[in-house]
Image: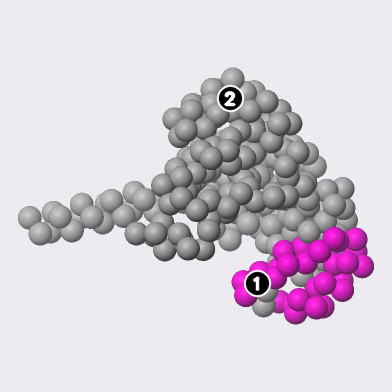
Amino acid sequence: MAGHNKWSKVKHIKARVDAIKGRVFSKCAHEIALAARMGGGDPDANSRLRTAIDNAKSVSMPKDNIDRAIKKGTGELGGDAIQEVAYEGYGPAGIAFIVEMVTDNLNRSAADVRSIFTKNGGSVATQGSVSYQFDRKGEIRIPADVIHEDQLMERAIEAGADDVRSDEDEHLVLTAPNELGTVAKVLRAAGLPITSEKHVSISQNPGVVTDPVIARQILKLHDQLDDYPDTVNVFTNFEVADEILDQLDS
């Protein structure tokens, strides 16, 4: 039976890896389709689409999947048109959530999102009742090892960016929403590899949770929203107090 048990474990691990890969591919496909819908299906003429395709290739997304996502975005596949939609809601302890989706069935997505919030101690909120707590920004991500932070700061600010934040892995360039494309174009022209280019919502006043039970509930809600097939982004004002981080890992 030892061999059987080993194979069962291998199958379980493979299933988890495939599930994670499937979610990654799904998010990549949504971004590709959305970029194609907004700017056309030619990556040479659509920088957002080119970035989305590069991101998909970096996680080994098959070419057929990429091509299908482009055609879905441009409407070549027929069927219901994809739409962008954002849902707002509150989780346990009043933590705010914004969930951005790309869907071809608004009724299904709305019902599913409401169900996820309800089952995890939260509730869907009316449009605008959460988003006012966030600042809308353009966000560009660049690997940290390709340029020094000071050099990037100078180029980015000259191009119209608001700020640059860096850690050991990557640089984060923040812009006004309407300046995202312009700044990204300048940085690309300088030969910098952009790994992500999108609009984000940044919390103005993060809510720090000090109760590990509440923190786990909020994390579960976040994960279920993020895992939903139509989800592109989940933004929240949730932060975990340093003293309970270790408890969440146990």
Q: Is residue 149 magenta?
A: yes
Q: Is residue 86 left or right of residue 149?
A: left
Q: Position of residue 113 (x, y in %)?
A: 54, 29
Work out whether residue 236 or residue 144 is closer to the camera in this orientation and state it. 236
Q: Is residue 51 left or right of residue 119?
A: right
Q: Residue furthest top?
A: 107
Q: Position of residue 229 (x, y in %)?
A: 52, 37
In the rendered image, is residue 179 in sight?
yes
* Amino acid type indicated by mark 2: Ala
Work out whether residue 129 or residue 85 is closer to the camera in this orientation and state it. 129
Evaluate if marks 1 and 2 touch, with contact meaning CB atoms under 8 Å apart: no
In the rendered image, which quarter is residue 114 located in?
A: top right
In the rendered image, which quarter is residue 77 located in?
A: top right
In the image, which disc is placed on residue 110? 2
Relative to 207, residue 99 above or below: above
Residue interval drawn in magenta: 146-173
SS category of the residue bearing label 1? loop
In the rendered image, is residue 231 in sight?
no
**From mark 1 to mark 2, how far is it between C-alphas?**
37 Å
Q: Is residue 125 magenta?
A: no
Work out whether residue 64 or residue 164 is closer to the camera in this orientation and state it. 164
Residue sitting at x 15%, y 55%: 5
Residue sitting at x 77%, y 46%: 136
Relative to 182, residue 85 above or below: above
Q: Position of residue 156 (x, y in %)?
A: 85, 67
Residue annotated with mark 1: 167
Q: Position of residue 180 (x, y in %)?
A: 83, 53
- Sequence order check: which comes first, mark 1 or mark 2? 2
SS category of the residue bearing label 2? helix
Residue sitting at x 78%, y 50%: 137
In the rendered image, which quarter is residue 27 located in?
A: top right
Residue sitting at x 53%, y 48%: 25
